Amino acid sequence: MGIDTDLATFVPQETPFRWSGIRELVYNQNLDSPFRDVTRRILFDAEHGLGVQVRYFEVAPGGWSTLEHHGHPHEVIPIRGNGRVLVQDRILHVAPHDLVYIPAWAWHQLRPEGEEPFGFICIVTVERDRPVFPTADEIEQIKASDPEVAEFIRY
């Protein structure tokens, strides 16, 4: 049985971490935002029938992703720069090609470490729930788990 090459997809990388025809989504940069200096690109979506969405996120130096949790897990593969990842009550120091599994309902947040952007592939199911942000009481509980966690989180 042959492969139908008309169904194949090839998207070249124009410059490092930028792909032809892949739109960059820039998140809100105002002071009320639960994240800062984050961009997202959807590399693969439901069109291939795998049931997952493959996304590339990039967090600029000094930025952070949202502190959140939800009912679906994430698989994260750093590919640019170094970063720190909060997973529930642990801070992980990660580098390119490490693998991070974030379980369902685990609080998580990602931040760059150093002066280079922190870029990572994030794989999630196509059908998933919306993120849940912590209440003031939950933030205090998260901070109380460990002094390093308290210093790390941004919201």
Image: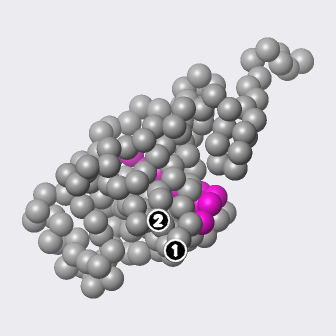
- Whether residues under marks 1 and 2 lie with C-beta atoms below 8 angstroms apart, the answer is yes
Question: Where residue 63 appears, x then y in whole percent?
Answer: 40, 61
Left or right: 3 as drawn, with respect to 30: right
Question: Where residue 69 appears, x then y in whole percent?
Answer: 30, 53
The residue type indicated by label 1 comes to Gly
The residue where tag 1 is placed is: 114
* 147 vs 61: above or below: below
* 90 vs 40: above or below: below
Nearer to the camera, 65 or 15:
15
Main SS of the magenta segment? strand
User: Was residue 124 drawn as part of the magenta stretch in this picture?
Assistant: no
Tell which circle, 1 or 2, labels the residue nearer the N-terminal end: 2
The local secondary structure at tag 2 comes to: strand
The residue where tag 2 is placed is: 61
Magenta-colored span: 71-81
Residue drawn where x is 56% and y is 66% of the image: 116
Q: CA distance from mark 1 to mark 2?
A: 7 Å
Left or right: 114 as drawn, with respect to 108: right
Left or right: 14 as drawn, with respect to 84: right
Residue drawn where x is 70% and y is 50% of the image: 16
Nearer to the camera, 45 or 17:
17
Question: Where residue 29 appears, x then y in whole percent?
Answer: 32, 49
